[in-house]
Amino acid sequence: MATLPNASSMIKNQNNYYNTLSGNARNISDEISTSRNEAVNAYIDAINNSYAGAIANMQQATNTGISALNQQYQKAYDVNEINRLIAQRQLAEQMENMGLTNSGLNRTQMAALETQKANANASALQQKNAAANALRQQLNDYLANIETQKLQNAANARYNAANANASTLENLLGNAQNNAASMAQTQYGAQSSWAEMLAGQDFTAQQNALNRQHELNVAQENAKAAQIQADREAQQRYNNIIVSAQEKYGDLKDETALDNYLKKQVALGYLTTDQADQIAYGIMVK
């Protein structure tokens, strides 16, 4: 005569089933997390690379400004030299008229004119260096601000990915626990039905019911696996849309074109309205 499984055996079976399901859930979660993290890294690289053009333009503007300062202050040096020549000629004529061309007074005043020119050149050089340093500081401040934005963008992206990874694992483990509990309930129901069968119920009908329940469990597992795959593809598509939007519209700052592009993605069902708003804000604000 057949015997019924005891409670200890049922609990052991449930634990073994949960361990198998949870192991599978962790493997799937690791795959999704790896894919999501790779997409986040690609997004961060694309965002960082998008700054290259603006940085190059700012550096070129700084170099152009410094070159312009060199030309501007060269004119000041030329004016100082012309003034010195004029003053020396006038002084030479005065000394000659007075018969003091070879006098100490003439040499002293000529030296004073040289000193005057040197002082004027030194003052112009100081002003030029101050203006050049101001341009360089402006460039350094801009680069520091860009670097801060890069770090903030990367931190936000990785924080969101970490939260999404944790949520994925939590959901998968929750499903595993529910499935294990469902298996235990099914086994308990089978045990009760088996007892009734041993009391006179039709064995074949009971076996068919168990088979149908097993097929239902398999179908549910397949459906959940398909949903996980669909979620993975949706996440990848979302990341691709972010990268594509940044590449097409990030440098142009064309808010209208970006908005039309994101609305199209919403209409196609690839984004929610909230996701589109978040992407637009992340691109246009940076």
Image (tube, rainbow, N blue to C red):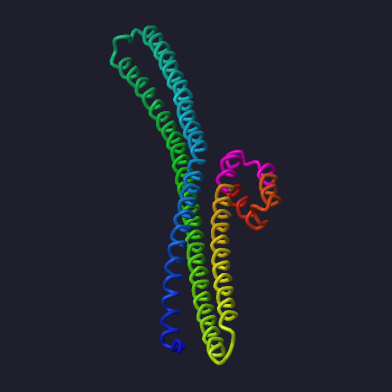
Point out residue 266 in the picture as x, y percentages from the top left corner. 68, 52
Q: Residue furthest bottom?
A: 199
Nearer-the-camera pick, 202 or 253: 202
Residue ID at (57%, 61%): 227
Label tally: 0
Q: Is residue 254 magenta?
A: yes
Query: Picture coordinates of residue 189 (x, y %)?
Result: 55, 84
- What residue is at 49 percent from the left and 59 percent from the top? 161
The N terminus appears in which quarter of the rendering? Answer: bottom left
Residue 164 position within the rendered picture, expressed as x and y whole percent measured from the top left: 51, 62
Residue 4: x, y in percent?
Answer: 46, 88
Q: Nearer the viewer, residue 279 or 78?
A: 279
Tell me if residue 275 comes above or below residue 183 in the rendering.
Answer: above
Residue at image location 46% in from the left, 51% down from the top? 38
Tell whether position 133 is magenta: no
Q: Nearer the viewer, residue 188 or 253?
A: 188
User: Magenta-highlighted stretch: main secondary structure?
Assistant: helix
- Tell me if 178 is positioned left or right of 118 in this view: right
The magenta stretch spans which residues? 242-259
Q: Is residue 7 left or right of residue 259?
A: left
Give above or below for 108 relative to 165.
above
Compared with residue 179, is residue 160 higher up or lower down, i.e. above or below? Answer: above
Nearer to me, 247 or 17: 17
